Each structure stands twice: as C-alpha cells, then as structure tokens.
Image (tube, rainbow, N blue to C red):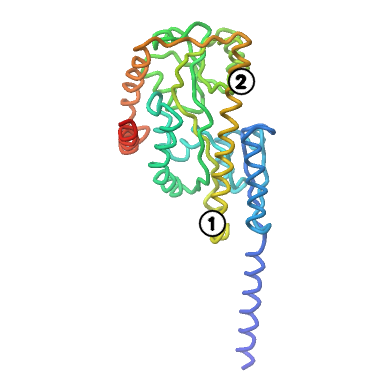
Amino acid sequence: MKKTGRITIIMILLALSALSLSAKPLEIKIGSPAPKGSPWDDALKKIAAEWKDISGGQVTVTIYPGGIAGNESDMLRKMRTNNLQAGVFTSLGLNQIYQDTLALSIPFLIQSDKEFDRVLEKVGPGLEADIEKSGFKVVAWTNVGWLHFFGKRPIITPDDLKRQKMAASDSDAAMAQAFKNLGFNTVPLSNNEVMPALSSGMVEACYAIPLAAAAYQWFGIANNMNGIPFSPVMGAIVLSDRAWKRVPENIRGELMASARGAALEMSKQVTKLESDAMKIMLANGLVVNPVPVGVKEQWEKEFSRGFEMIVGSTFSRDIYDRINQVLAEYRR
C-alpha cells in the first residue's frame, strides 16, 4: 500500500509539472526585413496584439524589424535552430523553403492582382501542405507589389534591356539563371550594392517594385521604367513547425484568421503607398516608357521560352501546369 501511495503521489506531481509547462507562455520571435513604421511592421504589431488577446496572454509575439535578424537566408537558418520562431519572407526566402513557390513569380505568367488571388486560392493550399513537410507553417500570404525594369536608357522591348547590364538579386539564383538563359547581361548584387553599381556604371539597369526603387533611390539614376509589371512579389508570414505545434490547437484557426486579415489590410496600404511613390518619382524625373501595341507579346514570348528551359529542374512541371490551367479557366 505504501508503494502504491508513493506511485500515486509521483504521478500527481508529474501531471502538475506537465500542466505547469503547458501553461508557460509561448514567445514567438519574428524577424522582418521591413523597417519600423512600414505597412508590414504595422501588420505585425496588429497580429502581436490580437494573438495575445486571442490566447489570453499564452502566445506573445516579439518583432525584430528592419533586418535586425538578418536577411531571409539568415532568418531561415535561425528558425531551424529555434533562435527565431517566425519570419516575414518574400519570394526569395519562400523559394529557399520550397522551390515550387518560384512558379508564382514567373515573369509575364500571372498578369494582375485578381489573377494572383485566384491562383493562390487554387494552388496555395497544396503549396502550404508541401511547405509544412519542410518544417514550416505559412499563416498568411500576400502580394507586396509588382516588379518593373528600370534602366538608364529607355526599356521598351526585350532587346533594349539586353543592351544594358542589369543588376540581378544575388539571393535569387533561379531568376538570375533564367535571365542568363535568355541572353540578358546580369550582374549578381545585393540591394545595398545596386546604387553604387548604378553610379559607377557597373550596371545600367535593375528590377524592383516601385516602392523599393523609390526607397533605395535607384530611379534617380535608372530613371526609365518599363510600363509593364512583369512579376508579382509574394510576401508570407511563416512559423517554424516546432513553434506552431506548441500553439494550442483550439486557437490555431483564430490565429491564422487574424494573420490573414492583417496581411490583407497591409496589402491595401501597400497599394496606396506605391501610388504615392510613383507620383513622387514622376515629379522627380522618372519616365515611364510606353509600350506600343504588340510589344507586350514580345516580352511574354521571350520569358515563356526562358522559363520552359528550367521547368522540371528549378520547379516542378506539375505546379507550372496547374497555374497555367487556373489562368486559362479564369481568362475564359
């Protein structure tokens, strides 16, 4: 009887210990490349407040804005070692988690915000499931803008761009390789290296969303912008699977709804800010190169040929065909 009593006491103590551990608040440290005061920063602050409220203080979010936690590769490495539990990623970081996400950013494939939303609605759940197999959980997606080409000289046709040395992101090897396959003269550079390279003549062109071209002041030198938005830039809030599994299951749906609502609100803010940025750049020397009838088709044909070369190696044929099917159905 004494032995049975001791075992009972031990079991009770173990149960109380487990209960104590489960009640310990979960701190989610999230890294973000977006600076303080930006729409992304505002969205993260909103999520932090709502998650704390939804969880009754059991889930807290600590934000590391402005690249304090490093670039997207650094954040991924820190999430794998649990030094960070979450991060805000663009297409570059998402491609490092799961390469099929690159297919959503193929130039001239998806051509409008509405098309992007429809494609994400149809293929997003499958991508999320595959990303989860890699040890990460996407809690929100958004489109943060559209890439344009900027050059020191006008860029109207693909040949105009091929005659200018172009900065290509040193973190996006697949995109850089696709440009090379098509005969573009690219120079791999980080964002901080683009301005000195433009100033020195090392490069004459670059690609960016208008907000970035304004923020980095690239448009002051590369003051010709091609009028066709050629690729959407995704943004996503991603948690490590380890952290997500520590979130109480009964509130996970509410937390995701909160994150997706904040991301949608942020996207609307970005649209307005981009419009404001365009007005400022146009008032300070930016020229939007008009695209004559038939020239857009030249760009589409050129890039379709280039990305056909890497389908099946850089991303799967399946995701490429699924996106094309969704777009074909939507455009009918």
Q: Which mark is residue 51?
A: none
Q: Amino acid at mark 2?
A: Ala
Q: Residue at x 54, y 55 (%)?
A: 252
Q: Taking 58 as reference, is 240 above or below it?
A: above
Q: Taking 92 as reference, is 187 above or below it?
A: above
Place of residue 124 in the rendered image (x, y in percent of width and height, measured from the top left): 42, 42
Please indicate whether residue 284 sits to the left or right of residue 312 in the image: right
Counting other residues with Cα less than 10 Å from the Cα at mark 2, is it few (<14), some (14-19), or many (20 or more)?
some
Q: Is residue 204 visible?
A: no
Instruction: Give residue 177's quadrant in the image.
Output: top left
Q: Taking 100 as reference, is 150 above or below it?
A: above
Q: Amino acid at mark 1?
A: Lys
Q: Taking 256 as reference, is 25 above or below it?
A: below
Query: Mark 1 or mark 2: which comes first in sequence?
Result: 1
**Residue at the outermost bottom position:** 1
**Residue that label 1 marks:** 245
Q: Is residue 57 visible?
A: yes
Please indicate whether residue 10 sits to the left or right of residue 331 in the image: right
Q: How many marks?
A: 2
SS for callout 2: helix
Q: Residue at x 66, y 54 (%)?
A: 53
Place of residue 292 in the rendered image (x, y in percent of width and height, measured from the top left): 39, 9
Please indicate whether residue 257 sits to the left or right of residue 58 in the image: left
Q: Are marks 1 and 2 in contact (CB under 8 Å)?
A: no
Image quadrant containing the C terminus: top left
Instruction: Say which of 203 and 258 sits in front.
Output: 258
CA gap between label 1 and label 2 equals 40 Å
Image quadrant containing the N terminus: bottom right
**Residue that label 2 marks:** 277
Place of residue 241 in the rendered image (x, y in percent of width and height, measured from the top left): 52, 51
Instruction: Give residue 304's quadrant in the image.
Output: top left
Counting other residues with Cα less than 10 Å from the Cα at mark 1, is it few (<14), some (14-19), or many (20 or more)?
few
